[in-house]
Amino acid sequence: MDFKALIEKMTVREKVLQLLQLEPTFFAAVEDEFNTGPKRRWQLSDADIASTGTVINFSGASKLHGFQDDYMRKNPYGLPLMTMLDVIHGYRTVYPIPLGLAASWDMDIVRDCTAMAAKEASYDGIQLTFAPMVDLVRDARWGRVAESPGEDPLLCSDFARASVEGFQGDLGEGKLAACVKHYAAYGAAEAGRDYNTTDMSERTLREFYLPAYKAAIDAGATTVMSSFNAFNGVPSSGNKLLMKDILRDEWGFDGVTVSDYAAMWELIPHGVAADEKEAAYLSMEAGMDLEMMTVTYARHLEALIEEGKIDLKQLDEAVLRILKLKEKMNLYENPYHFADEKKVEEVTLCKQHRDLARRAAEACAVLLKNDGALPLNKRKCKIALIGPNANTGNMLGCWSGKGKDEETVTVLQGIKNLIGEGRVGYAQGCEIGLTTTDESMIPAAVDLAKTAETVVLCIGEHKWDTGESSSRMDITLTDVQLKLFDEIYKVNDNIVVVLFAGRPMDLRKIKDRARAILCMWWPGTEAGNATANLLFGEVVPSGKITMSFPWAVGQCPIYYNRFNTGRPRSDDWKRCSCQSAYIDGPNSPLYPFGYGLSYTTFEYSDLKLSADKMERGGVIKAGVKVKNTGDYKAKEVVQLYIRDLVGSVVRPIKELKGYQKIELDKGEEKLVEFTINEDMLAFYGADMTRKAEEGKFRVFIGTNSDVKEYLEFELL
Ligand code: BGC
């Protein structure tokens, strides 16, 4: 396609409209609420709609042909529309929420799952997904932690890369273009309240928050979404430092930028634009291409160009990027991409996809506590399955695509599938909602608990308790769930808790009394089968949390790669010792980053470094022996952390620099080795250049971020 000639032919209005993204309803010619409502209010004519460049929230292979044909017939140049949707952790087959998926520490699974989602969605007429979301998160109050890979820049980056590879592949059949989001630092919303302001140093931004977006872009993500938050006083959609200086000039990103839903218009309530026209001006100046579901460009860009405030060249460049994205997806040749109703039927919820969703859910589960209660005995045990999350398909979590609760395997069903009907009784116990206080179902649950050997208590959150605009001040279990636990405990103290939640929770009130706690996150379509397999030891848990579980919500934000301070809390800390500590609780979280138990035990020994000095450009090998000393063949995530002891600026007390997920037979021992190079030691120093500074480094290899044993080497 000769884009230059095309752009020359297009009127300014037609170009402006390529930048507009609307919901499907706007494209219908019938008089309905959209045509008489928003469409008219926004002064969009039918001709405008015929030139609008992209459509959000479109899906359905059966509809796409008619929809696209109709659009192309009306479009003055016969151009195709591009369809976009949030395909975050699955489509009809749903796999665990990203915070869970990351807990697998298995990037092959991430790649396979995103590829599976792409397949189901792409056949169903979707061409771009607004994913991966790779906002680094440190505050469990924020509802969107569920969508994030967690608190570590290395893991977030690996997750970003694997997701883009899975979604996009070669962008051909069964593939989606990927849009990395929400650029930038949306996960640092103050006080964990969604859409709230973010304020941080450029060093923190570059060191912790940016790497994952950059990794997605380096992996070829076609599109970048600006975030809702103000970053150091300037909302992302109008933020030149983020959108231009860093993204375009420094990283050389030449793909499309898209605003989050209405985020360009929101420059007005943010208070940096007086009106829509100024919002359009600031966004264009910052380098925003696509406007999602508001019309600041559509209504004001032409005037801004006529008045000479915006250079026509800027508009042409934005249009070119969008036209090129459509070319990348081969839409000029094949405007339906590979939408295919028959294929939808073939792949949707097919055995292969369900198997993968189950394996992913198994790999993501984190065993937080076990005093020997798990695994349960498949042949003998009699269980009371209790709890609001025990017999519900509400297992998919936020942003679960086209997933349906009724197509989801409940825990009750999963257990019956594995051990039969005979030895499991069920009682709901209570409702799950945050505001529910009804205790009337508790007595029946207590009666059931009396009759069983083990109580499996499925509690946690409702799926709507995490996700967008679902921030919480209190991350404990609801009172009625705690009451249910207490009452059951009085009659049967053999309680295994299965937690379904989209965030780290404060579990102090049950932690000591529960005999085991298995965190399943929101596991997806195969929830019940995966849970049953884990409970009964068909599969051994191997997930590790990628976000610290706070001891109490007051610790938030909390993260393992923190700085030491000038007065670090000592082991013998006492009140009034003037150290950086809380007087009413510990500094450390309930469960640290990287933590997760197994049914077996692992012994780490013989930590070794190949040298105690590293030349510039050289490498050092760090190795440790890991032995399976328990009774189950199992997987372990071996984690490498490094601490730079003295820098020109303060350095984290530990940073994850590598990890390997290995499998060991009973009694088997393996030497696990990591290669440390200079780049792994680099950071933004006092002069803001990224380099490794000479001096001593500590190397830790262990089972979670709380590992104590270390060796040291010196970088010359
Ligand atoms: C969310 C984005 C999402 C977009 C489109 C917004 O509200 O913040 O993550 O991609 O809607 O659905």
Image (cartoon, rainbow, N blue to C red):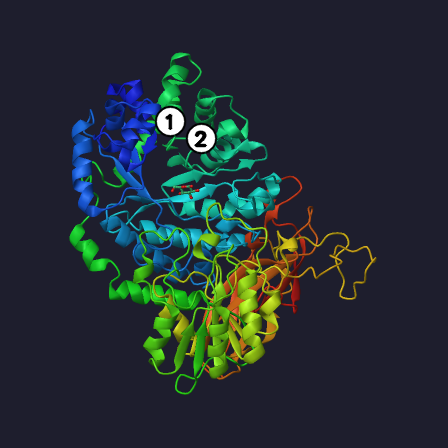
Q: Which residue is mark 1?
A: 295
The answer to which of 712 and 78 lies nearer the viewer is: 78
> For the point 39% across and 75% down, which residue is it?
533
Describe residue 555's horizontal placement relative to residue 433 as left or right. Answer: right
Tell me if I can see residue 452 in this picture.
no
78 is higher (above) or lower (below) than 387: above
The disc placed on residue 264 is 2
Quarter holding residue 201: top right
Q: Secondary structure at mark 2?
A: loop
Q: Residue furthest top?
A: 307
Quarter holding residue 316: top left
* Dot 2 alpha-carbon crowd within 10 angstroms: few under 14, some 14 to 19, many 20 or more: many
Cβ of mark 2 under 8 A from ligand 1: no
Describe residue 114's horizontal placement relative to residue 367 as left or right. Answer: left
Q: Earlier in the sequence, mark 2 or mark 1?
A: 2
Q: Whole-percent x and y of residue 160?
A: 43, 51
Q: Whole-percent x and y of residue 176?
A: 30, 47
Q: Secondary structure at mark 1?
A: loop
Q: CA distance from mark 2 to mark 1?
A: 9 Å
* Amino acid type, residue under disc 2 in the picture: Met
330 is higher (above) or lower (below) than 681: above
The answer to which of 478 and 372 lies nearer the viewer is: 478
The answer to which of 216 and 343 lies nearer the viewer is: 343
* Amino acid type, residue under disc 1 in the picture: Val
Tell me if I can see residue 454 in this picture.
yes
Q: Whole-percent x and y of residue 492?
A: 54, 80
